[in-house]
Image (cartoon, rainbow, N blue to C red):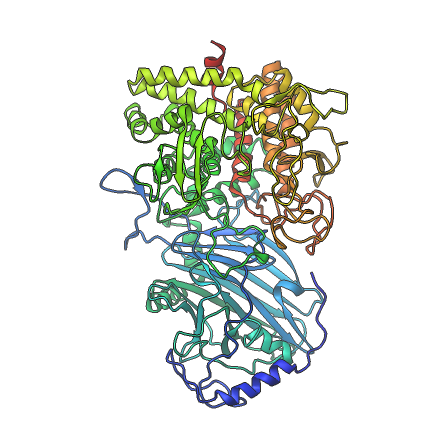
Amino acid sequence: MTSKPVPFTRSLLALSLGALLSACGGAKSNIDAAPAQTASVSETILVAPGAPGASPTWAFSGKTGIGTSYEPYVTNEQGADQYLSSQANPVSRVWFSLAQGILTETMYGLIHNAQLKEAQFIISGNGFVDTEKDNTVTSIDYLHKDAAGRPLSLAYKVINKDIEGKYQIEKHFFTDPDRDSLVMQVFFTAFEPGITPYLYVNPHIDNSGANDIASVSQDGNSLYAYTSDKDSSVLTVRGDIPFTASSVGFVGESDGLTDLKANGELNWHYASTSADKQSLGNVAMTAALPTLEVGDAKRPSLSTTLVFGFGADKTSSEQNAQDTLTAGYDKVLAAYNGEGDAIGWQDYLQSLSSLNAMTANTADEGKLLYTSAMVLKAQEDKTHAGALIASLSNPWGDSVSAVTGSTGYKAVWPRDFYQCAMAFLAMGDTQTPKVAFEYLKKVQVTAATPGYSGVPGWFLQKTHVDGQIEWVGVQLDQTAMPIMLGWKLWQADVLSDDEIASWYQTMLKPAADFLISGGEVNLDWNHTQITPLKTQQERWEEQQGYSPSTAAAVITGLITASDIAKQAGDLDSSEKYLAGAKSMAEKLDSLVVTQQGLLSAEDGTKAPYYLRLAPNGTPDSADKLADNNGRAGLDQREVLDGGFLELVRYGVKSANDKTVNNTLKLIDNTALEDNLRVKYEFTAKDGSKFPGFRRYGNDGYGEDTDTGANYAENGNNTPGQRGRVWPFFTGERAHFELAKAIADGTLNDTSKSQLVQTYVKGMEAFANEGLMLPEQVWDGVGDKTRFNYQLGQGTNSATPLAWTHAEYVKMVRSITEAKVWDHYEDVAKALND
């Protein structure tokens, strides 16, 4: 945290704005016009100057908590499960995130539709003005836990203590399951006199922070934010006690923080940022709460409930906020938790039939397991049931522009989607993965896909949850995984024989045909010819060529498609898919295994080994990978990637395969230079060691080693950028070690316990205080950045990452069953026949 700021002085900005006030003193707001709230500046309503304000960004992406209400599905007249809001079963479509001790991106409507960048408190006292984010030490916990300390809902308690001990702020966060609103219960405690808290809210309505308008209600007790669009969402902020003063303004120019930094007082009292809906920009809303005093008959503490209400118009937004306040903290929290007759998060956890048995194979009594279950479910959209996003965050958001809308990771990738769906199934939730599987038809390319011509059947790279196309690269693993998921659901009796046959005709057959034959693709910028096994993009979405991990999915997808086709009565296609898979498996090593490698292991082991990628399928040549993320492309034989382990996981290769184990030795070589090194070692709280792995050598998707800047902060081709360790690879390695123990016949209680103590405990150690698992953690290489990351601490890339939580869940299920959860026995059997 930063040090306490020096005592304030009146700034030149404040003086110049004072002059500006005189010039615009006659301006009137046509939104909630009211008498001025200050006599020291003007007796008339003032419209805030300084549009458009500072250029907007998103918030810090290392979330310590996310939340939303748990909502049960409703079966419609066609027999499909969906989210259907009714008077008897209202659906709350609000999601929130927490980072650095404050409320950050909060979404309403669709899960990617952010309405808020952040909300925090400014604290004014004797000679100082603090911001909660910068001047406090933060702790976070869950409000609703069982006797073992396992979270039972995504309701949080955040305590922020002033670094100099002058005050403390405790906040409770949860959403109202019956309304589109978010509750923030606040408890202030002052330890010296004259402490005044100010709520400071920076809205980013409808996923942009550059087009907002803010205003104050006539009574001064409600704050509103919206855009000039006629269909704009509206945010209302209201509390259960009156604000003592309020103002709106443009960030960095006329907002409350700029005002308070000048002299510790809220002197500017603007009622609106726009008189005619023409002055738009990055706005902030500020509201003062009563000053806290210390001493006899004084008030050293204060509690208040603040509600952020959302709606399609001002009336519904304010009504949601007021109705939540009227319902009260206790009733709303109980409903959120699922206490009494209400259906909430604890009901969802109780429905997960595998959770109890899995808990015995964790190292933390199931705390991260319970959290992971809720985190995964919280990342589903509630308008488009089954739409599972990658993360409720914008990677490196504090340096990412919010001038135009960006979904960040709040979008659908079929690959991440598959990982989550398989984790739901592992926990005993059969409903969510079925609904998710059915959703996938929305993101498959067909003749009806807007702007598309070419061969149908493949699945779009990245889309909004409503199916709107965002990225259009062809990734063959993302076309295989929906087939794999369908087969798993069929085998688990989640899909009946008739259902899987029907889905074969409508979705899976076109996908399998594309995996066999590929074809011409024309969509947006993408005009290419796909010839499997060569993929336009591998699982890191960066390179074209032949990829072991992509091949693992394609071969598995075709073998499972063959089985499904047989069930559907399409015997010709069944034979074609199986023959194609076998042919691909037979020639795979010649495409991606080098016999003339440039790397060696610590024990001297050299080639053959799997390459990260072979651009042209000539692995013994000096072909270079493409430049990417600021890193110049290297000889393909210099770059290692653990993706080849997917070949073992799915059943394409044996865990005892010589080339697999050779490559593993190279991956484990910690003597490689840091640019090429993949494996790093970390220490759990009890002092035990466990491994972590980067995506691949020469990865540039991460913070700059020279300057500590965020990824792409200075352009995405900065040479010093470095991809860090990704925690879910620790889970991928655990799956291999389990498969190896099974193949060797050495799996017993002792070896199983070792897997828990090394890999399960390792992934648990990567979780932050809020039990969120990150995309990347700090590996100790280069500048620690402005955030002074500690070894193994999640970075600002994306937390929580759904894939990481899913891998943890699947790993625990695999160890519990003593069987790799997403292994495909029919694949190994088919390839060995």
Residue at image x 47%, y 15%? 583
Q: Quadrant of the N terminus?
A: bottom right
| Side of 183 relative to 159 (left or right) | left
Tell me, yes or no, if residue 713 can be seen here. Answer: yes
Q: Residue 569: where, in percent of width, then height?
A: 28, 18
Q: Report which quarter residue 778 is drawn in.
A: top right
- How many marks can you see? 0
Compared to residue 635, the image places residue 175 above or below, namely: below
Extreme-top residue of the structure: 833
Q: Residue 34: where, in percent of width, then height?
A: 40, 84
Compared to residue 27, the image places residue 147 above or below, namely: above
Residue at image x 52%, y 73%? 250
Compared to residue 205, the image places residue 623 above or below, namely: above
| Side of 194 relative to 513 (left or right) | right
Looking at the picture, tell me which residue is in the foreground, 659 or 143. Answer: 659
Looking at the picture, tell me which residue is in the foreground, 51 or 441. Answer: 51
Extreme-left residue of the structure: 77
Q: Residue 165: where, in percent of width, then height?
A: 70, 67
Residue at image x 41%, y 23%? 516
